[in-house]
Image (tube, rainbow, N blue to C red):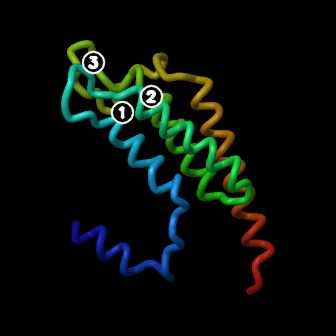
Amino acid sequence: METRRAACRSRPGPARPAPRGARRGLPDLHRGHTARAGEHLVRDDLCAEAIRLGRLLVELMLDEPETLGLLALMLLTESRRPARTAPDGDLVPLAEQDRSRWDRALVAEGHALVRRCLRRARRRAALAPP
């Protein structure tokens, strides 16, 4: 925890407040992937809702690389869901996951969003005053 606080203190300026939907989307995804009770480790409904909110944010905030990056992160995480747990319900570390079980369409969409996000960020940096 102290490392996280130190990292926050070292940031160059104040963080912009996240839009209301953004504050909800990632926590939904996190809770969806870390269910604390029940038969399943993953809550499909919360994961789907987080991605729905992420897509909505991208529509509403077209020029924001942060929203594109958030949706890309959620899609790439979701793409691995089928391979994240073993048949007995235990978590499977990333290095040991069967990548043939990953959702290739979500991986492709996530990668495309990352590239789009980077292009927009570069464009913004080029237009910013020195």
Q: What residue is pinned by disc 1?
A: 94
Q: Residue at x 56, y 37 (%)?
A: 52
Residue 65 placed where, x, y %? Answer: 65, 58
Q: Is residue 8 above or below residue 61?
A: below
CA distance for labels 1 and 2: 9 Å
Q: Residue at x 60, y 54 (%)?
A: 67
Q: Specify whether 38 is left or right of 85.
A: left
Marks 1 and 3: in contact by CB < 8 Å?
A: no
Helix, strand or loop at disc 2? loop
Q: Earlier in the sequence, mark 2 or mark 3?
A: 2
Q: Specify whether 59 is left or right of 82.
A: right
User: Which label was assigned to residue 86?
Assistant: 3
Judged from this view, the residue extending furthest toward the front is 20
- On the rendered image, what quadrant is the N terminus found in? bottom left
Residue 43 placed where, x, y %? Answer: 35, 28
Nearest to viewer (mark 3 / mark 1) = 3
User: Which label was assigned to residue 80?
Assistant: 2
Q: Specify whether 81 is left or right of 61.
A: left
Helix, strand or loop at disc 1? helix
Judged from this view, the residue extending furthest toward the top is 87
Q: Amino acid at mark 1?
A: Leu
Nearest to viewer (mark 1 / mark 2) = 2
Q: Is residue 31 above or below residue 66?
A: above
CA distance for labels 2 and 3: 12 Å
Q: Amino acid at mark 3?
A: Ala
Q: Residue at x 26, y 34 (%)?
A: 35
User: Which label was assigned to residue 109?
Assistant: none
Rendered image quadrant of residue 119: bottom right
Helix, strand or loop at disc 3? loop
Marks 2 and 1: in contact by CB < 8 Å?
A: yes
Q: Amino acid at mark 2?
A: Arg
